[in-house]
Image (cartoon, helix red, strand yellow):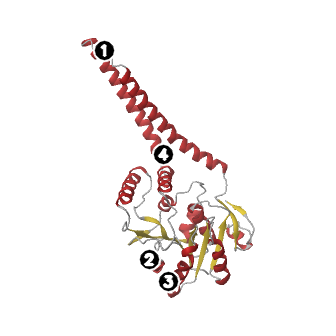
Amino acid sequence: MVQVSIVVPCFNESEVLGVFHETLVTALEPVGATFEICYVDDGSTDRTTALLRELAGAEPRVRYTSFSRNFGKESAMLAGMRMSRGAAVVLMDADLQHPPEFVPRMLELHQHGYDQVIAQRDRAHEGALRTALCRAYYRLVRRCMNVEIVNGAGDFRLLSRRAVDSLLSLPESNRFSKGLFSWIGFDTVSFTYENVQRAAGQSKWSGRHLLNYGIDGLLSFNSRPLRLAIHTGLWLFLSALLYALWIIANAVLDGVETPGYATLITAVVALSGIQLATLGVIGEYVGRIYDESKRRPHYVVRETDESPAALASGLSLEPAGQARPET
C-alpha cells in the first residue's frame, strides 16, 4: 500500500532533475512512509525523458510518463494524478522552487485531518513590477471569480485521495487547477515559506504565458465578463440618450449648433472599440464551448513504464515505447 505519491511535472529540467530527485528522496526517507514518485515529462526537448527512464530503471519507487509533445502543465498534473496510487498526493515542480524539505510538514498536517495542505510562497526576491501586477490580479480575481484564490498559493500542495478523486471526476478540457483546487472544497490549511529561486535553467513562464494563464483563470470560473458587456452597453445607451437630449435642448433653447465631425468620430471609435472587446469576450467563451464539444484527449502518451494493469484503475496507458491517447 503506497501512502504518499509525489507528482512531478517536468519540461526541459535535465539540468536540475538529478539534484531534485536526490533532495526529494533524502527528505522523504526519514518520514518512514511508503512513497512513490510519479514523473510526467511534458514533451521535453532535452534529456529529461532519458533521465527519467534511467531513474525508473534504477529505482522501483519511480514511475514516469512522457508526452508526445508539450501539452502544458495542467495536462501533466492531470496525468500524474491519474498515475498516483497513494492515500496522499503531493504536487510539486522539479526546479526546486518547491522545496522538498517541506513535504514532511505537509504530511504531518495531513495527519490532522486536512484534505488539502497548501505551501504558500511569499513574494520575496521578485521584482517590484511583477509583485504589484500579481497583487492587482488577485484582487481582481477575488472580486470576479466564484472561487477563492489566494496570492502565492500555487500548485505546491498535498491532496488527500478523496480530493484527488474529486479532481479526476471533473470532465472539462479547459482546466485551471488553481480554481479547481478551491472549487472542490474540503478542509484546507496552509503555511507560508520564503520564495526560492530556480536551481538551474530558465523559467518556462514568460510574461505572455502568465498573461494568458491569468485570462484563462478569469474566464474559467465566472461569466461576469459577459455581464459586464451587458452593463457597459446599457450605460453607453443611457449616456448617448442623455447626450442627444442635451444637444436637442441646446439647439432649441439657445440655438447652439449641433457638434459635428470631432464628436461623431470620437463616438464611432469608442463604440467600435467596445464592440470589438465585447465580441472578443464572447469569442473566448464560444471557443471554450467548441473545445469542450470536441472532447479531445488532454494529452497523448509517447512513452511510459506503466503496466497494462494500470488500465483497471482508469489509467489508459500502453506499455513503454507505445503511444495511446489519454482522455
Choose top left, top right, bottom left or bottom right for residue 139: bottom left
- Please tell me whether mark 1 or mark 2 is closer to you in this view: 1
Residue at mark 1 to residue at mark 2: CA–CA distance: 74 Å
**Residue type highlighted by circle 1:** Glu
Q: Is residue 132 left or right of residue 102?
A: left
Q: Residue at horizontal 66%, vertical 74%?
A: 50
Q: Identify the residue under disc 3.
A: 27
Which is more N-terminal, label 1 or label 3? 3
Q: Which residue is drawn at 27% across and 14% down?
A: 256
Determine contact: label 3, label 2, CB under 8 Å. no
Q: Which of marks 1 and 2 is nearer the N terminus?
A: 2
Measure the C-alpha gap from mark 3 to mark 2. Answer: 16 Å
Q: In this view, does 312 lie above or below 254?
A: below
**188 or 135, which lies in front?**
135
Foreground of the two, 195 or 77: 195
Q: How crowded is mark 3: few (under 14 residues within 10 Å), some or many (20 or more)?
A: some
Q: Which amino acid does label 2 sit on?
A: Leu
Disc 4 marks a residue whose amino acid type is Ser
Which label belongs to residue 109? 2
Q: Mark 1 points at which residue?
A: 257
Closer to the eye: label 3 or 2: 3
Mark number displayed over residue 223: 4
Q: Do the residues labelled 1 and 2 touch (CB within 8 Å)?
A: no
User: Tag 1 or tag 4, which sits nearer the N-term?
Assistant: 4
The answer to whether residue 123 is above or below residue 255 is below
- Residue 66 is situated, as x and y percent measured from the top left of the image, at 66, 68
